[in-house]
């Protein structure tokens, strides 16, 4: 039985999605419990698999018993086990937080919403677990299609337009990736990652392999929204319903970073990338530009939701740059940042969701007296903000620390500079929110101020508990980041380097 | 010069897919109407499907069905060069499904947009979005 656990991780949400689509017609009230069951199952098996991996090394699973070059393989090593765990955790906490708003905002679309929600989770889990290049493309598209639909359910004026824009760019990204896979297939005759990895060193001088790598890389960059390919990202997340942007914003981009790491470590190999290609320097410069551009654009926003979206653009720069620094410290920082950033952004979006639920808007100048009326939510915001800035007990500090050390070791002064600059800008952003909350802005001061002052108007408890859990996670992961790096991340990186 | 021509003619399938892909990309970037953009997107995806299909082709080869299947003759040696490679074709079946699904989602979104704004021209849409 235990040998089938890797497949169960993906099958549970997938099956639950099918069951849900039936309950959409029969009884909508059952959709939510089924969703929780599906994600809970995948969380349980994810935990089991993580312990197995830590005990006895990577797990290989052959779907339907077909051995690798012919069949599809699932391969779970330290990194994928870690990411496999984050996905159901965030999806579950989000269900808990969003139940009320799903009920209010999407009353008649509840059934489809939960179904697509599960499909999205199943797709992401599959992307993380698979060891087959074409299978990865298909699962990537399942994930993307689900996210187009989830994101389009929001503000009817803007969300469909933003989502359509995302469809166009997402298709270009996925097609580039597919094209890269085609070139790889022509050169190697295989689609299995380990198989391709063993064939590539013999033909690594070929320009077709380089073209394949660049196509795959650019395709994944479009999907993750690396500056300057980020244009679809801010609008999509801003106008989506909070319940879906809270799921997609922390997970989608992080899993795409994971895919990039997977391609670099398990398909092309670090030797090929850092020694034969001359891209390294340019990618680090590009990601430094992404960090600075994301931070500066976040500074220019008046809407908290958009600000958060640009913070994501900035954080993607951290991760891509960290990996491409090419040394253990930088890579460890980037991998740790996948976990940290998923949780930080999730906490930030939970806070924004609470604010939207209570106040219906998130403009900076509508935050008058928010610290007295929503103290718990704002405490969560300050903690998430501290983590994004990188203040010690929170998890954001530790990954940033590794990234900085890596940057100094690699002598990438621009990257180090942009890291520090973006930390400073995030500090300004957080204090700007604090200022807007405590000191009402000029014009609507007179009429609104007295009414809102000192009235406790907090989000419901069912939305505060998830925020509390996530905030606890931010601190817990910060305190235990040493263990995560030592037992999970470093073994993975050493496998790739050797 | 003849070398270059030969190069192009020998690999005409790759040139064809690149031309198709660029047509699709051009339509996606330059066209004003959302449906035209969508058609461009579809051409773009189809170009990649054609690329995959053409890579499985071999000169003087037949479809990969082994004749005289069962019984005594089943174990006679099979020359791989006599059969075209079926794998890219099978992959493309899945890719076609993905293409259709994307097209469906995009059309659904376009219907939503049309119901809201009663136009599919991008410049007009941009104007109306600003008015709201």
Image (cartoon, grey):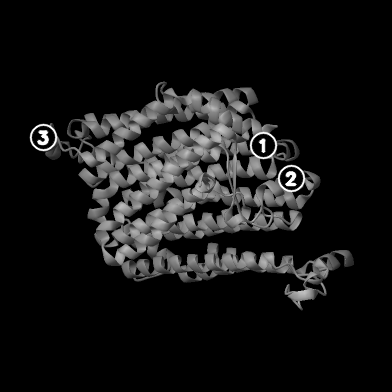
> Which residue is painted at 40% across and 47% down in the image?
A41
- Are the numbered discs 1 and 2 placed on the same chain, yes or no? yes
Q: Of A365 and A290, which appears nearest the observer? A: A290
Earlier along the polypeptide chain: callout 3 or callout 2?
A: 2
For this orientation, the residue located farthest to the left is: A451
Eye-nearest disc, 3 or 2: 2
Which subunit holds the residue at mark 3? A
The answer to whether A181 is drawn above or below residue A335 in the figure is: below
Q: CA distance from mark 1 to mark 3?
A: 57 Å
Callout in the foreground (1, 3): 1
Q: Secondary structure at mark 2?
A: helix
Q: Is residue A438 left or right of residue A296?
A: left
- Label 1 environment density (alpha carbons within 10 Å; few <14, some 14–19, many ≥20): some
Residue holding disc 1: A280
Q: Would you say residue B52 is visible in this rendering? A: no
Ranked by sequence position, the earlier of labels 1 and 3 is: 1
Name the chain under label 2.
A
**Dot 1 and dot 3 within a common chain:** yes
The residue tagged 3 is A450
On residue A198, the disc is 2
Q: CA distance from mark 3 to mark 2?
A: 70 Å
Which residue is pictured at 62% across the width and 39% down the height? Answer: A283
Q: Is residue A486 visible?
A: yes
- Mark 3 and mark 2 on one chain: yes
Most distant residue in the top direction: A392
Residue A147 drawn at (x, y percent)? 43, 55
Say above or below: B34 vs A70: below
Q: Quadrant location of the C terminus of chain A?
A: top right
């Amino acid at each position: 039985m235990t040998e089938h656990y890797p497949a169960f991780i993906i099958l549970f949400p997938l099956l639950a999605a099918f069951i849900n689509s039936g309950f959409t017609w029969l009884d909508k009230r059952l959709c939510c419990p089924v969703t929780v069951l599906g994600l809970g199952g995948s969380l349980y098996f994810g935990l089991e698999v993580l312990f197995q991996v830590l005990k006895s090394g990577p797990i290989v699973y052959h779907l339907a018993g077909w051995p690798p070059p012919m069949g599809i393989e699932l391969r779970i090593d330290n990194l994928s086990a870690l990411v496999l765990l984050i996905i159901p955790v965030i999806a579950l906490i989000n269900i808990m937080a969003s139940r009320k708003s799903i009920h209010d905002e999407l009353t008649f679309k509840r059934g489809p919403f939960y179904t697509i929600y599960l499909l999205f989770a199943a797709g992401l889990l599959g992307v993380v677990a698979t060891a087959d290049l074409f299978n990865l493309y298909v699962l990537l598209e399942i994930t993307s299609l689900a996210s187009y639909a989830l994101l389009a359910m929001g503000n009817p004026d803007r969300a469909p337009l933003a989502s359509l824009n995302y469809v166009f760019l997402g298709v270009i990204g996925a097609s580039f990736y597919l094209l890269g896979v085609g070139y790889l297939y022509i050169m190697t005759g295989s689609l299995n990652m380990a198989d391709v990895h063993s064939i590539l060193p013999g033909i690594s001088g070929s320009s077709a392999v380089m073209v394949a790598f660049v196509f795959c890389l650019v395709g994944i960059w479009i999907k993750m929204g690396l500056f300057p390919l980020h244009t679809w990202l801010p609008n999509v997340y801003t106008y989506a319903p909070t319940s879906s942007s809270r799921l997609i914003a922390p997970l989608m981009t992080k899993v795409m970073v994971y895919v990039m790491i997977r391609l670099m470590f398990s398909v092309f190999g670090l030797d090929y990338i850092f020694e034969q290609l001359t891209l390294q320097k340019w990618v680090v410069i590009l990601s430094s530009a992404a960090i600075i551009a994301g931070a500066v654009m976040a500074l220019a926003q008046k809407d908290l939701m958009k600000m958060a979206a640009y913070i994501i653009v900035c954080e993607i720069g951290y991760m891509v740059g960290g990996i491409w620094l090419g040394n253990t410290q930088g890579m460890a920082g980037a991998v740790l940042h996948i976990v940290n950033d998923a949780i930080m952004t999730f906490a930030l979006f939970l806070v924004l969701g609470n604010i939207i639920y209570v106040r219906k808007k998130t403009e900076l100048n509508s935050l008058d007296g928010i610290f007295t009326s929503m103290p718990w939510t704002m405490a969560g915001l300050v903690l998430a903000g501290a983590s994004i800035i990188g203040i010690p007990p929170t998890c954001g500090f530790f990954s940033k620390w590794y990234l900085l050390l890596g940057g100094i070791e690699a002598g990438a002064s621009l990257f180090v500079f942009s890291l520090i600059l973006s930390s400073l800008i995030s500090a300004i952003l957080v204090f700007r929110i604090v200022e807007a909350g405590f000191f009402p802005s000029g014009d609507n001061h007179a009429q609104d101020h007295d009414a809102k002052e000192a009235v406790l108007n907090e989000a419901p408890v069912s939305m505060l508990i998830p925020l509390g859990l996530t905030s606890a996670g931010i601190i817990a992961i910060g305190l235990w980041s040493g263990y995560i790096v030592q037992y999970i991340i470093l073994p993975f990186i050493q496998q790739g380097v050797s | 010069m003849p070398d270059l021509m030969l190069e192009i003619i020998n690999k005409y399938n790759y040139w064809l897919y690149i031309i198709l892909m660029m047509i699709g990309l051009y339509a996606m970037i330059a066209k004003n109407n959302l449906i035209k953009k969508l058609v461009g997107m579809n051409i773009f995806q189809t170009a990649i499907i054609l690329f995959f299909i053409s890579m499985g082709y071999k000169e003087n080869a037949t479809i990969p069905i082994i004749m005289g299947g069962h019984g005594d003759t089943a174990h006679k040696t099979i020359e791989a060069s006599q059969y075209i490679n079926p794998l890219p074709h099978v992959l493309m079946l899945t890719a076609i499904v993905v293409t259709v699904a994307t097209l469906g989602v995009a059309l659904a979104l376009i219907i939503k947009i049309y119901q809201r704004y009663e136009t599919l021209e991008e410049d007009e849409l941009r104007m109306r979005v600003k008015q709201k």
